[in-house]
Amino acid sequence: MKKNQFNTKFGVVAATVGSAVGLGNIWRFPYEAGAHGGGAFLIVYLLFVLILGIPVICAEFLIGHSSGADVYTAFTKLNGGRLWRLVGRMGLAAALLILGFYSVVAGWTVEYIYQSVISFGGATTADELHAQFGAFSSDAVKPLWWILAFLAANYVILIRGVGKGIERMSNILMPLLFVILLVFVINSLMLPKAAEGLEFLFKPDFSAITPSVVLGALGQAFFSLSLGLGCLITYASYFRADTPLVKTATISALLDMLVAIMAGVIIFPAVFTYGQEPSAGPQLVFEVLPSIFLNMPGGIVWATLFFILLFVASLTSTLSMFEILIAYMERSLSMSRLKAVSLTLMVVIVLSTLCSLSFGKLDGIRVFGLNLFSLSDYLSSNILLPVGGILISIFAGWIVERHTVRLELLGSAPSTLLRISVRIIIFNLRYLAPIGIGLIFIFGL
């Protein structure tokens, strides 16, 4: 057995789904759906996951699994030439950018676990909670302590390696996450205006589908599934030889979609029941939901449980992004795991500190009108991830030897359904994914 390898099939699915399921599903999806009309956004998002998401997951899986390498060298090991290392460099850059701003939001979730326990310091109205969040997020010091606490949790897990660290923790955290989600869904469906919230989420107004909605749905699909930066290439390099790639990709994508839909089912009935605005934006989770929880029976318990849910989702995602960088340092730079984890953590601490301060002392630093936090989000989600997705699709569809692609995706005893599915996946990777993602990416620019 390889030193760094997932030990069980359940561990493979748990870690892969954990990589995909994160703040993108529970924090980002509800406010994106709210801002883009609910049902219309959901339909476009689901189509992108099915038509583009699953094939690109398969592409990352076959690149990582067949090369057994980190994201930087995987492409050259599969006869891609040195030029294709650019994709690996983009993945490393995207991972750093995302970890920079993602850790800030994850730190907020730790703060709000504490705030939930102390009843949000006596704040009760939406205006008071808005002021409280603004004061906290713009503080020069307090958010940094929570960022450090969150990154310390990552360090403790990562230092133990893939099997004993990432896999073992994913096996615990992912079932816990789904249990908490299910409890929330049941509670949400019992709210007085649950029907209105569900109608907003599931009844699409197709006239509301605009280029902005389409671009937002594409960004959400790629951000949520962790596509285009190399998380899944890195994890697939740890898969056992008999791991069914297409099946694992499909399960991961479907479970990721399920979590996003469950998050919508949790949030929108509550938003409508308590007279809040579904298009509240990023502050939906940290300002609007606390005011809702405070009006619920047992609201403190619900609030605490919800922010624990966000923390768990954040942790499983950041583990995979850290592993992109750690695997590169271990394999390409021949560093020990201890040194690789420690160095990566220090770099992320610096980046996340800058992103956090962009809400306060560094707010005056703007690039194209964006502060450092928003710039990191935009560059990674709207540029690096889609471009990475295009290049990974082209590489898997056109550059990797067809024999290798079929061997990786079909396995040793393929069924007729699997053969048909693989033909569709290859067609999508060659034509639909690069063209579709490319057109929407160009329009976004």
Image (spheres, grey):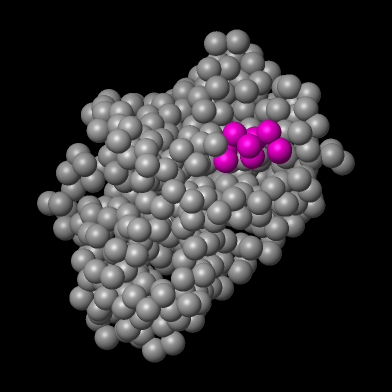
Q: Report the quarter where the N terminus lies.
A: top right
Task: Identify whether 174 is placed above or below 374.
Answer: below
Find residue 432 and report its horizontal and vertical position in percent: 37, 31
Displayed quadrant of residue 25: bottom left
Name the outermost residue toward the bottom: 297
Residue at 31% in and 46% down: 217
Q: Nearer the viewer, residue 338 or 133?
A: 133
Q: Which is the main secondary structure of the residues drawn in magenta?
A: helix
- Say whether residue 178 is left or right of residue 258: right
Residue at the top extreme?
82
Q: Is residue 40 above or below residue 308?
A: above
Examine the rendering and report whether any part of residue 278 can be seen.
yes
**For this rendering, which residue is in front, 396 or 306?**
306
- Residue displayed at 46% across by 71% down: 115
Expressed as whole percent of the image width and height from the top left, the position of residue 277 reads: 21, 66
Residue 346 inside the magenta-drawn segment: yes
Q: Foreground residue, 313 or 401?
A: 313
Compared across the picture, whether 377 is left or right of 234 comes to: left
Please identify the quarter of the rendering in which residue 265 is found: bottom left
**Visible in this render: residue 440?**
no
Q: Residue furthest left?
A: 207
Bounds of the magenta span?
A: 341-349
Q: Going 63% across and 63% down the picture, which residue do you hit?
A: 173
Q: Position of residue 421 (x, y in %)?
A: 51, 42
Q: Quadrant of the C terminus?
A: top left
Q: Is residue 278 magenta?
A: no
